[in-house]
Amino acid sequence: MLRLLTPTRFDWFVGTSRDDRALLDAWRRTPLSYAPGDEQSGGWHQDSHAVPLAPHAGAAAFAAARGLLLRYRFYPPRIMRTVGDWDVAQRTLRVGDRLIQRFDLAALAFNLPPPAGRSPLTLTTMNVITAVVDTPNRAGFSYTTTRQHREQGVWSAAVARDDDGALTLHVNATSRPVPDEPRRNHRLMRTLQQRGHRLGIAHFRQLLAEAAP
């Protein structure tokens, strides 16, 4: 039935224990679907968030925020499960690392927990880490979509501490649905994308509060 609405391949009733690590190798040669300058054509969305985290953050708070972000601890696991090359190697992320994302669409759209631990409908994507910054007062990364994604673009997140000690989370995204996605689905995709951003930012703030009280 869904094939009549979208060419996207979904997975049904996936258990939370499913291991997506095999896709890191199976999809490793998948090419990127975005390059800087592509957004000169039409249909792109630009998102930019600057979120205050602490007005006078010390070194420990910045280190905690850095540690979370450079291991991609951002989105709530109930809406998105992730695995990256850095998880397998047990390190922080690097340029060239691959990232698998599995979205629980019911949780994202309706805030519903998976029944009996099995997500009724999931979507799996792959991205590539294309930039990393790691300095004494700024840390973050960017990833770019591959052709194993129903959107194309680039997403970035960074934490920065200014001279007064104010700690801020910066999230930016340039994106649009892939060309073969029917236009009737674009508004829903955009709604889910924006909801995901809000939930991710809130979750990151919660993680930081727990890591650096």
Image (tube, rainbow, N blue to C red):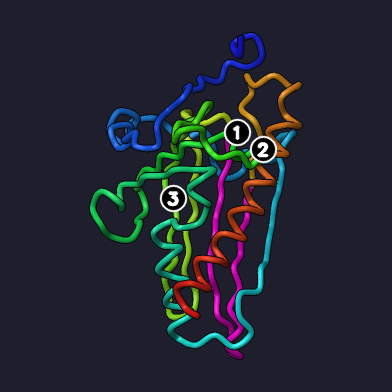
| Residue at disc 3, secondary structure | strand
The 10 Å Cα crowd at callout 1, few under 14, some 14 to 19, many 20 or more, is some
The answer to whether residue 136 is magenta is no
Residue drawn at x 40%, y 31% is 15
User: Which residue position holds label 1?
Assistant: 106
Give the residues drawn in magenta, as a range. Answer: 152-173
Dot 2 alpha-carbon crowd within 10 angstroms: few under 14, some 14 to 19, many 20 or more: few
Q: In this view, does 109 lie to the left or right of 16?
A: right
Q: Relative to residue 167, is residue 183 depicted above or below? A: above
Dot 1 lies on which element?
helix
Residue located 54% across and 41% down the image: 35
Is tag 3's residue or tag 2's residue first in the polypeptide sequence?
Answer: 2
Number of numbered tags placed on the structure image: 3
**What's the magenta bit mostly, secondary-structure-wise?**
strand
The residue lying at 48 percent from left, 29 percent from top is 147
Residue 130 numbered mark, or none: 3
Residues at marks 1 and 2 touching, judged by CB atoms closer than 8 Å: yes
Q: Residue 152 at x, y = what percent?
A: 58, 35
Are the residues at dot 3 and dot 2 in contact (C-beta closer than 8 Å)? no
Identify the amino acid type marked 1: Ala
Q: Distance between the residues labelled 1 and 2?
A: 6 Å
Viewer-closest of 203 and 147 = 203
Specify the farthest residue to the front: 116
Q: What type is the residue that disc 2 sits on?
A: Phe
Residue found farthest to the bottom = 164
Tell which of 62 and 173 is nearer to you. 62
Q: Residue 180, percent across and down?
A: 62, 19
Q: Which mark is residue 110?
A: 2
